[in-house]
Image: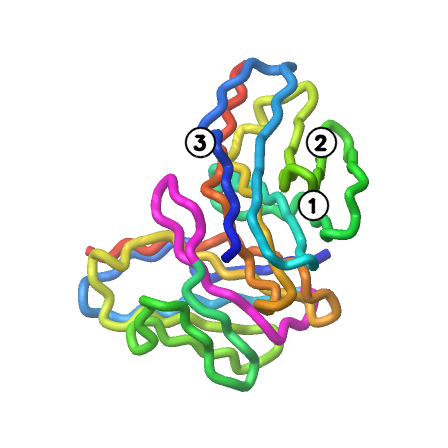
Amino acid sequence: GAVVSQHPSRVICKSGTSVKIECRSLDFQATTMFWYRQFPKKSLMLMATSNEGSKATYEQGVEKDKFLINHASLTLSTLTVTSAHPEDSSFYICSARRDRDEETQYFGPGTRLLVL
Amino acid sequence: AQKVTQAQTEISVVEKEDVTLDCVYETRDTTYYLFWYKQPPSGELVFLIRRNSFDEQNEISGRYSWNFQKSTSSFNFTITASQVVDSAVYFCALSMVFVGNMLTFGGGTRLMVKP
């Protein structure tokens, strides 16, 4: 299989605090992982590409200082939403590509973030 | 530029009906991949199928079937004898080798199967 987990599945935080979301590939190595954001009833929007051992590549319009990405191992990438504000409330989904299969992305279950 | 269009935003059917979800794509590349993902209410995207641009053979998997036609740039998905558990949002996506296999998603089609 190709299982990707995310933690936490749901988080509520106060405005101004930082929130870290973890994405793990459980049964495969993933040099490349992706972070998406999804608004209600909308499609997925790619935020950034996370590469193990190097800096993430951010899509246009995504603030890299706001959304910190760290990909320290072949099975773990983290997204930290710094100084969160209510407009950061959203559904964040990560995906991972198996190193031996670069064509297919496998998605995690997502994290619902609510900033009060 | 690449683009994926799912013209049907919502479809409602009664259980046991067949339903086809349309997907039309645009790309200038000759080497690309097409995908379908299912997103049930829980939120997780479930991978259903991948097709590469050189393989136009249609595929059937149980009640699911896919029709890939390069001549019309379409990759349609049919569910036969739909069930309530098929209710979800379905996304069609395109990736191209020259942009590192990044996924471009369509807008999604919300399928509601009523008992």
* Residue denoted by label 3: B9
Same chain, labels 3 and 2 = yes
- Write down the region rendered in magenta: A27-45
**Is A7 or A1 nearer to us in this picture?**
A1
Residue shown at 51%/65% (left/top)? A34
Residue shown at 19%/69% (left/top)? A16
Pointers 2 and 1 in contact (C-beta within 8 Å): yes
Pointers 3 and 1 in contact (C-beta within 8 Å): no
Q: What element carries label 1?
A: strand
**Which circle marks residue A61 in the picture?**
none
* Residue denoted by label 2: B64
Verify whether residue A90 appears in magenta: no
* Drawn side of residue A85 relative to residue B95, left or right: left
Question: Where does the image place residue B52, in percent across and percent down from the top left?
Answer: 73, 52
- What amino acid is at disc 2? Tyr
- What amino acid is at disc 1? Ile
| Above or below, A18 relative to B78 | below
Q: Earlier in the sequence, mark 3 or mark 2?
A: 3
Host chain of mark 2? B
* Residue denoted by label 1: B49
**Is A41 or B83 nearer to us in this picture?**
A41
- What amino acid is at disc 3? Thr
Host chain of mark 3? B
> How many C-alpha atoms fall within 10 Å of the one at disc 1: few (<14), some, or many (≥20)?
some
Same chain, labels 2 and 1 = yes
Question: Where does the image place residue B77, in percent across and percent down from the top left?
Answer: 65, 33
